[in-house]
Every structure is written in structure tokens, then in C-alpha cells.
Image (cartoon, coloured by chain):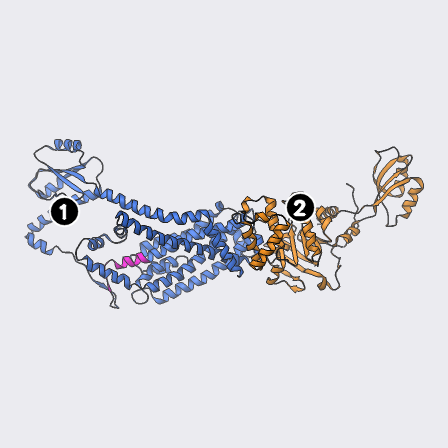
Chain colours: A orange, B blue
């Protein structure tokens, strides 16, 4: 793995939706603070979660993600700060418009699947008839129609997760919160669920997605926020953040006679790292950091001396950004 | 249907459909009736055993006193030595040998009499023998004092004082005990209900925690709603179970009484009433009158008042205790961790029952009875033990009743508020073994 040198960023200054924020956000948190005794779980965290998108809520263990999610679900209440749902101050009736799949989730073991799904749907305010209709639809969609009369204790973990997913989305909430939705699923079923999440988004739902699996963040999220030690240290559009984090590092593959000498000469002019020469005689792969976004000078220089095969800008992955930001933040403190 | 209704319905059905609950519901009356039948049967066997006692009477006294009764037979040895008598008693397998030595003085005879048995003698037999000696000695003393046998017979009658309250209400002897027992059974019922169904509430909370469904549920309903629904649903299941128990046990008992001819009423009355009252009620012909009086008195007990207060105290007491149980369930991860918290709950309940039986029965309106019937954690039980005596003059003063209920209601609100706070925090805490200090901190979250 290569090292990226990160320019200092002013954290938390991405007011992407500064204008008409109310119109385009499903949820706004303003300076939300929550303390448990001496321990601060959230310290003045502000977030704006845009409508009809998938928002990645990231952070190491104990960063305060679950507390924030519980505040959104009105399971706990903030000590300070406000949360707005669709432009209104968060109120009990909003619960019916939120679907929450917690990380610590389970079902009543001795209850039958159908009965239990009906119960949970009714608690979300659906009528029995409506709940039954929608459950039938979802059970067929996920091919679990024959489970209706099974007891939960007969199901495997993955099967139970499917039921929980259905129950979370059944009441067609405006805002869906998934906390590690793929845990317990095999790759095939994880894919099915991932597709369903994308479908839900396409149907108009806004989704908060909390996970440690960065590849799914990369795949799904348009926006992210990074919490660390009860504070938000980064948020914004994932592509913008990546642009902020990229630092003109390019991966270059070329063919040249006298590789060592070439690299030595090049290193005088540019910052070259990780040169690999173990392939064919004249082949070199290396990373180079350019002083600016303008790559013409470099390309002119190189193309005079070598045959360039590839020239690719490296964009940091969500994983890199996550680790980098958290580590930088930790050493700063 | 609103959310609370849904929760109550689910809790009720989950409880009632539970296999062990169903088995307990239908097995318990059978076990209970079986136990009564067994005790009745064993008592019968016990009673029908006849003990044979050999009497070696070398004196001139007591010649007619040792008459064979239902349970004891006397065999007189004549003209043999004490050693011979002992040998033949042993070889015949008699229960014991009563040796009355020869002497001219009755006191000496009695003083030197010995009762020999193989093992330590039963106290009932010894009592019986002692009574015979005592009676003889008393008669002898009276004769010495110049009282004739006729005169003695004339003064030998029992006296019972009539009691009444200043309000003019006449009391029957033993009635206060009966009233206390009625109150006591109400109190006992409350205690049993709290311990059984409070435990159910607690286990149900723990189950929700360990199955990790709790966070899903409380993202739809308020934790307080869930707790309340759980308590109400479980108690409805409990009331159903109690109802089935009472009905089926009475039916079974009827069947047993009619088909086997076992008389369980004698048993239960013998256990509850003072023995002389029972003797009076069953033995003497005049008993029917007394029986009727008792029936009238029982009828006069203010049942409606009693049952309404039973409902009030039952509801408040049960809600207080079961919300504590719910809070405990929320605080722990598994049932083994509950012990340290359960004991302080059981303590006031036990105290109430024992104080009730020992203090309230003998003095229903004494300072201890009053104190415990005002203290909210014991009042549901102790006050119910006092209430059959009536309200107002001669009974529980109205101010005490009102104070007790007011204190109970205030406590109820306070405890439920505290329990709900612990519950709300506790249900989301995993993998922690809480201490009292921790719980105290949770109150501030």
C-alpha cells in the first residue's frame, strides 16, 4: 500500500446543501450533544442528510454512530441540539416514517414468522389487512413464502435477517436506517439485499447506511459522514471528499531502456515512489506525485524518453480516507 | 388497535401459548387436589391405627379409668412382676407399658407411676395418660376439701365470655381469627401473584434483551409503553391461570369428595380454626345453632368492601412490584444475575406475611399492624389482613385506610417512574453486570 500525503483540510466545511437545505434534506441534526454520565457520546454533531440518496454514517467502534441513530429513532434524546425530520422538529409521529434495522437485532424465538412480522408491522402503524398484503408481496419477492408458519427458532441466521429486513421496509418509510445490514448474509443474499436497498432508493426513500465494510460504502453511498470520538470529523459528497483527498498521485507504466538511470533522473524532478521493475526488461511501474493537477509537464518529459503504456490518476478509496482521517485526528489530539 | 393493545395482546398470547405455562395451568389443580386427597387419606390411616397399652396396676386406684377408646386400647396385667410385664409387653408388640405401683397414697402412686415404651412415646398418648392422672388427683383433692362428686360435676362447666364492640356488634368467639384468615388469604394471594407473575415479567424482559428484538420494538413504541404492555399482558395471563386453577380445583375437589367420600372440609377447618371451636362445631348437637351463627357472621363480613379494596391493593401492589421486576430484567443479561436484586424485593413481601400472621392476627389494630399497613411495600398485604374487621369504629380507622392508599399511589407513581428509567437504559445495555451504583447512574441518563 502506498502512502498518500494529505493536504490539511478544514474539516467540516462542506456545506453542500447550504442553500434551500430544508427542501432537499430528510434529516438535519444541529449541534447534537449527548452525554452518558461522564462519557460524551456525541459532541455538537451537525449533519444534513439529503433526500433520496444513500448516506454513509461511518466511524470506528464507539464513535457515537449508534447513539446518533438512536436519537434519530427517538430511543434516546439529545441533551442539547435539535434534530429536524423533513423540515419539522423531530416528533413522536415521525417514528412511523422511519424504518430502522439495528445492528443488535433479533426476533421473538418462539413466535411464528408471519405472526411476528404482522405484529411488528402493526406496531409501525399499518393495519392488519394492509400489513398482510405487503408481507405477502415481500415474502414472494424474497422467495420465502413458505416460511409464514415456521417458528423463528427453526430459521437460520440469514433467514431471520431477511425477515428483519422486510419488517424494516414494510411500512414504506421516508427514511431508512440500516446498521450493518449485510452482517449474517452469505454473498448471494447480501447482493439481493443490496439490490433491494438500491431499489428502495430509486423508489424515493432516503437511506442512512452505517457499516464498517468500506467496499459497500464505495458501492452504495453518495454522501458520507465520519464520526470519531463523539465528533464529526468529515462529511460531504463522497466524490467531493475523494477529490479533496486525492493528491496528484499517478500510476505510471512505461517502457524505457536503462531503467535505473531513467528512474534516478526522474526522481530528481518528480516525487517517485514504489518503482517496480521485476517484469520484462524494459518495463517499469511506479507512482509519482505531481506538484499540481497539471500533468502536461510530466507527460512531456516522460514521453520524450520512454514509451508510456498507462497513466492513471489514483483516487483514494473510502477505506483509505477512513483510516487516514481517523489516524490523523487521533495523533492530533 | 393501538400500540399498547397490540403489546398486551402479544404478551398475553405468548404467555398463554407457552407449553410450560399450559402444563402448569392444567397440572397444578390436579396436583393440588391430589395432595389434599393424599393428606386426607394419610390422616385416615394415621387415625385408624390402634395403639395397645399394657397397664400393670398394682394400686387400688385407677381401676376403671383406662377405658379403651377409638385409637387406644388398654390391656390390664394382673398379679405379675414388672419384669414379666415388660417382657410380655415387648413380646406381644404392644405400644407401651404403664406401671402404677402399689401405695396407699394417691399422690405417691401417681408420682411413682412410669410409662415405658420401646421408642420415645408420642406426645398425644402421654397427654392422654397425664389427663387421666390429673383428673383423678383433682377429684381426690376436692374430696379432701369436702367437695362431693356431685358438687364437683356441678361446677365443671366451661365458660365463654361474650364479646361485643362499643357499636353494639356482637362477636362470636373465633370469628376474629376467621376474619384474619380471610384477610390473610387475600394477602397471601397477592404475595403469590406478585412472586409468580412478577418473575414472568422479568423473564419476558430478559428474553427480549437476549433475543435482541428490543431495539426493533422500541424504535416503534416507547419503552414505557412496552413495559406497561408487558406487565398488563402478563398479569392478564396470570389472572386467566388463577381463574382456571380456582374453577378446575373446585370442580375436581367436588368430584373427589363425591366419588371417594373424602371430607376435605374437616381438614381445612381443622387447620384454620382453633381446635375447641372445631370440636364444638362438629361434636355437640348444639353445634348446628353455632354453625348457623357463624354462617350469619361470615355473611355479615363486608365482602363487597373487602373485594373492592382487594382489587385496589392488588392492582397497586402488583404494579409496583412488577415494574421493579421489569427494571431488574432490563438491568441484567441473564437470569443468574438477578439474584442480588430479587432478594430485596422478596424481603418486604415475606416480612408482610410473617408480621401479618404473628402480629396482625393477635392484635389487628396495634402499632405494628398499623405501621406495616401504612408502609407502601407491605400495605397491600397487611392492610388486607386488617380489613375484614370492618372500617371505621371497631375496625380500621378511615384515616389509616386513606393514608395507606395515598402513600401507595404516590409510591406507585414514584417507583414506576424510577423503574421505567432503569428499564429504558437497561434494555439497551449488553454484556454488563450492573451494580446498584450503576443503576443509580442510569437514573441520570
Left or right of A111, for residue B316: left
Chain for disc number 1: B
3D distance between C-alphas at marks 2 and 1: 94 Å
| Residue located farthest toward the right when viewing the structure as drawn | A304
For the magenta stretch, what is the residue range? B169-182
Query: Residue B275, labelled with which disc?
Result: none
Residue mark closest to the camera, 2 vs 1? 2
Q: Nearer the viewer, residue A273 or B46?
A: B46
- Residue B317 in view (yes/no): yes
Query: Residue A190, labelled with which disc?
Result: 2
Q: Nearer the viewer, residue A156 or B228?
A: A156
Q: How many marks?
A: 2
* Residue at 50%, 54% in the rendered image: B10
Residue A265 locus on image (x, y percent):
90, 39
- Residue A64 in view (yes/no): no
Q: Nearer the viewer, residue A303 or A109?
A: A109
**Which residue has dot 1 on it?**
B134
Left or right of B287, for residue A332: right
* Contact? badges 2 and 1 (CB < 8 Å): no
- Quadrant location, the N terminus of chain A: top right
* Residue at 88%, 39% in the rendered image: A254
Residue A167 locus on image (x, y percent):
60, 53
- Label 2 secondary element: helix
Chain for disc number 2: A
Amino acid at each position: 500500500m502506498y502512502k498518500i500525503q494529505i493536504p490539511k483540510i478544514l474539516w467540516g466545511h462542506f456545506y453542500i446543501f447550504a442553500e434551500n437545505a430544508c427542501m432537499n434534506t430528510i434529516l438535519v441534526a444541529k449541534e447534537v450533544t449527548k452525554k452518558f454520565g461522564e462519557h460524551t457520546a456525541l459532541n455538537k454533531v451537525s449533519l444534513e442528510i439529503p433526500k433520496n440518496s444513500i448516506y454513509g454514517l461511518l466511524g470506528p467502534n464507539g464513535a457515537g454512530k449508534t447513539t446518533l441513530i438512536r436519537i434519530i429513532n427517538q430511543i434516546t434524546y439529545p441533551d442539547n441540539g435539535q434534530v429536524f425530520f423533513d423540515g419539522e422538529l423531530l416528533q413522536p409521529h415521525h417514528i412511523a416514517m422511519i424504518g430502522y434495522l439495528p445492528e443488535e437485532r433479533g426476533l421473538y424465538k418462539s413466535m411464528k414468522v408471519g405472526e411476528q412480522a404482522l405484529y411488528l408491522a402493526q406496531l409501525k402503524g399499518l393495519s392488519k389487512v394492509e400489513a398482510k398484503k405487503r408481507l405477502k408481496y415481500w415474502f414472494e419477492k424474497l422467495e420465502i413464502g413458505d416460511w409464514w408458519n415456521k417458528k423463528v427458532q427453526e430459521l437460520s441466521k440469514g433467514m431471520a435477517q431477511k425477515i428483519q429486513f422486510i419488517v424494516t421496509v414494510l411500512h414504506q418509510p421516508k427514511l431508512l436506517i440500516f446498521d450493518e445490514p449485510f452482517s449474517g448474509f452469505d454473498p448471494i443474499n447480501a447482493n439481493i439485499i443490496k439490490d433491494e436497498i438500491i431499489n428502495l432508493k430509486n423508489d424515493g426513500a432516503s437511506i442512512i447506511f452505517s457499516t464498517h465494510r468500506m467496499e459497500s460504502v464505495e458501492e452504495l453511498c453518495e454522501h458520507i459522514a465520519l464520526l470519531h470520538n463523539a465528533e464529526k470529523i468529515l462529511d460531504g459528497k463522497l466524490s467531493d471528499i475523494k477529490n479533496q483527498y486525492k493528491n496528484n498521485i499517478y500510476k505510471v507504466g512505461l517502457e524505457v531502456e536503462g531503467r535505473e538511470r531513467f528512474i534516478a533522473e526522474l526522481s530528481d524532478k518528480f516525487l517517485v515512489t514504489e518503482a517496480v521493475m521485476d517484469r520484462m526488461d524494459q518495463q517499469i511501474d511506479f507512482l509519482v506525485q505531481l506538484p499540481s493537477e497539471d500533468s502536461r509537464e510530466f507527460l512531456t518529459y516522460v514521453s520524450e524518453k520512454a514509451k508510456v503504456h498507462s497513466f492513471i490518476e489514483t483516487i483514494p478509496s473510502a477505506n483509505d480516507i477512513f483510516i487516514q482521517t481517523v489516524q490523523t485526528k487521533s495523533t492530533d489530539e | 388497535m393501538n400500540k399498547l393493545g397490540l403489546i398486551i395482546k402479544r404478551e398475553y398470547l405468548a404467555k398463554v401459548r407457552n407449553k410450560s405455562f399450559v402444563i402448569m395451568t392444567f397440572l397444578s389443580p390436579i396436583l393440588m387436589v391430589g395432595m389434599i386427597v393424599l393428606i386426607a387419606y394419610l390422616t385416615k390411616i394415621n387415625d385408624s391405627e390402634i395403639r395397645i397399652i399394657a397397664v400393670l396396676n398394682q394400686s387400688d386406684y385407677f381401676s376403671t379409668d383406662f377405658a379403651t377408646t377409638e385409637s387406644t386400647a388398654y390391656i390390664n396385667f394382673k398379679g405379675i412382676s414388672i419384669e414379666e410385664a415388660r417382657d410380655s409387653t415387648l413380646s406381644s408388640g404392644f405400644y407401651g407399658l404403664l406401671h402404677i405401683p402399689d401405695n396407699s397414697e394417691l399422690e405417691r402412686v401417681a408420682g411413682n407411676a412410669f410409662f415405658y415404651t420401646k421408642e420415645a412415646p408420642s406426645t398425644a398418648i402421654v397427654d392422654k395418660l397425664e389427663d387421666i392422672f390429673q383428673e383423678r388427683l383433682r377429684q381426690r383433692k376436692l374430696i379432701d376439701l369436702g367437695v362431693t362428686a356431685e358438687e364437683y360435676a356441678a361446677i365443671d362447666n366451661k365458660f365463654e365470655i361474650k364479646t361485643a364492640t362499643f357499636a353494639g356488634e356482637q362477636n362470636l368467639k373465633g370469628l376474629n381469627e376467621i376474619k384474619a384468615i380471610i384477610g390473610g388469604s387475600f394477602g397471601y394471594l397477592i404475595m403469590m401473584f406478585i412472586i409468580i407473575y412478577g418473575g414472568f415479567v422479568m423473564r419476558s424482559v430478559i428474553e427480549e434483551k437476549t433475543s435482541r428484538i428490543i431495539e426493533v420494538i422500541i424504535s416503534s413504541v416507547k419503552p414505557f409503553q412496552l413495559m406497561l404492555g408487558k406487565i398488563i399482558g402478563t398479569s392478564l395471563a396470570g389472572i386467566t391461570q388463577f381463574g382456571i386453577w380456582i374453577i378446575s380445583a373446585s370442580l375436581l375437589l367436588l368430584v373427589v369428595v363425591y366419588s371417594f367420600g373424602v371430607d376435605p372440609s374437616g381438614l381445612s377447618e381443622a387447620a384454620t380454626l382453633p381446635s375447641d371451636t372445631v370440636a364444638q362445631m362438629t361434636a355437640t348437637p348444639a353445634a348446628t345453632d353455632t354453625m348457623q351463627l357463624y354462617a350469619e357472621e361470615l355473611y355479615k363480613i363486608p365482602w363487597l368492601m373487602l373485594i373492592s379494596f382487594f382489587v385496589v391493593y392488588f392492582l397497586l401492589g402488583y404494579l409496583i412490584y412488577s415494574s421493579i421486576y421489569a427494571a431488574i430484567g432490563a438491568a441484567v443479561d441473564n437470569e443468574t444475575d438477578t439474584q442480588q436484586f430479587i432478594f430485596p424485593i422478596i424481603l418486604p413481601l415475606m416480612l408482610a406475611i410473617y408480621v401479618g400472621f404473628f402480629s396482625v392476627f393477635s392484635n389487628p389494630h396495634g402499632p405494628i399492624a398499623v405501621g406495616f399497613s401504612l408502609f407502601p411495600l407491605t400495605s397491600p398485604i397487611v392492610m388486607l389482613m386488617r380489613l375484614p374487621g370492618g372500617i371505621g369504629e371497631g375496625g380500621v380507622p378511615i384515616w389509616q385506610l386513606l393514608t395507606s392508599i395515598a402513600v401507595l399511589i404516590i409510591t406507585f407513581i414514584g417507583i414506576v417512574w424510577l423503574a421505567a428509567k432503569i428499564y429504558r437504559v437497561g434494555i439497551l445495555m449488553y454484556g454488563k453486570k450492573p451494580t446498584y451504583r450503576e443503576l443509580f447512574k442510569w437514573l441520570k441518563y
